[in-house]
Image: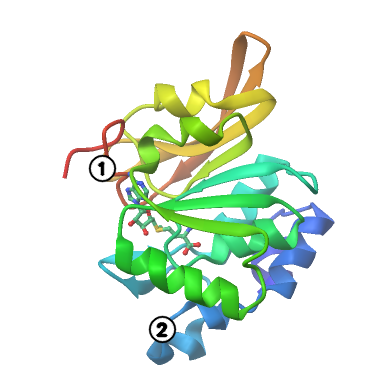
Amino acid sequence: MVADQLRARGIRDDRVLAAMEAVPRDAFVEAPDRAEAYADKPLPIGAGQTISQPYIVARMTELLGVRPGDRILDVGTGSGYQAAILAELGCEVTSIDREPQLAEQARDRLERLGYADRVTVIVGDGSVGNAALAPWDGIVVAAAAPSVPASLRAQLADGGRLVIPVGDRRNQELLVIQRRGDGFVQHSDGACVFVPLIGAEGWSE
Ligand code: SAM
């Protein structure tokens, strides 16, 4: 997976590659899909949701540009895989999902794998972030919004980055937004396809 899907397609950050190698992706998928855990595709995780393709997890992590000790908000816990990758990189992660069943499973899994000291999983609407715990050194969103949620932007620390897919329900662009003092700089990393971000600053159900 790391050689053929990540390094070969341009993931350059050695720390991200090492984290992708260290976290056992097979522990984050359901038993019938274990044989395909390292395949180049998203897989179902229940509640109509998916664990993202390995490449997109690596790319979003690389774009986030984290350092050990960073406080990161991970919106869309899903299986907990992205949160584990960030924890492996030394981040202090708050991960939020609107589906209680997925959050509970991810919490158990992350605890079993030894990440509980660096990841807190909560249930709620991540489209509005978490103002009580802000500012965040980085925010990564694994579900697509119709526009950049103002709350997420506002909760970035100076220099912090927001990585989020934005577009319509079928096609989106992966945006990287960085706070620079009172302003923001933004660029697109290209096309992507995600499940919808459902919430107050996302899509309605
Ligand atoms: N990062 C996950 C992983 O590593 O397995 C994959 C996330 S999955 C593609 C998208 C997730 O976003 C789903 O679990 C879904 O329940 C969640 N989601 C959608 N809208 C949300 C919202 N407003 N707040 C929090 N989570 C949300």
Residue 169's disc number: 1
Q: Residues within 10 Å of mark 2 (few under 14, many from 20)?
A: some
Image vertical order of residue 23 relative to residue 150, above or below: below
Residue for point 66% across, 56% down? 86
Q: Position of residue 167 (x, y in %)?
A: 34, 34
Image vertical order of residue 61 relative to residue 31, above or below: above
The residue singled out by tag 2 in the image is 30
- Considering the numbered disc 1 on the image, is that residue within a helix, a strand or a loop? loop
Residue type, label 1: Arg
- Examine the rendering and report whether any part of residue 197 can be seen: yes
Residue type, label 2: Glu
Residue for point 46% across, 79% down? 29
- Considering the numbered disc 2 on the image, is that residue within a helix, a strand or a loop? loop
Foreground of the two, 143 or 168: 143
Measure the alpha-carbon separation of dots 2 and 1. 26 Å
Which of the 4 image quadrants contains residue 97? bottom left
Are the residues at dot 2 and dot 1 in contact (C-beta closer than 8 Å)?
no
Instruction: Give the quadrant of the N terminus.
Output: bottom right
- Examine the rendering and report whether any part of residue 41 can be seen: no
Residue 19's disc number: none
Image vertical order of residue 169 relative to residue 177, above or below: below
Q: Position of residue 108 (x, y in %)?
A: 49, 75
Which of the 4 image quadrants contains residue 147? top left
Given this view, does label 2 or label 1 mark the residue nearer the observer?
2
Q: How many marks?
A: 2
Image vertical order of residue 10 relative to residue 107, above or below: above
Residue for point 38% across, 33% down? 128
Residue for point 67% across, 75% down? 114
Disc nearer the start of the sequence (2/1) = 2
Is 76 placed left or right of 74 in the picture? left
Q: Position of residue 55 (x, y in %)?
A: 59, 60
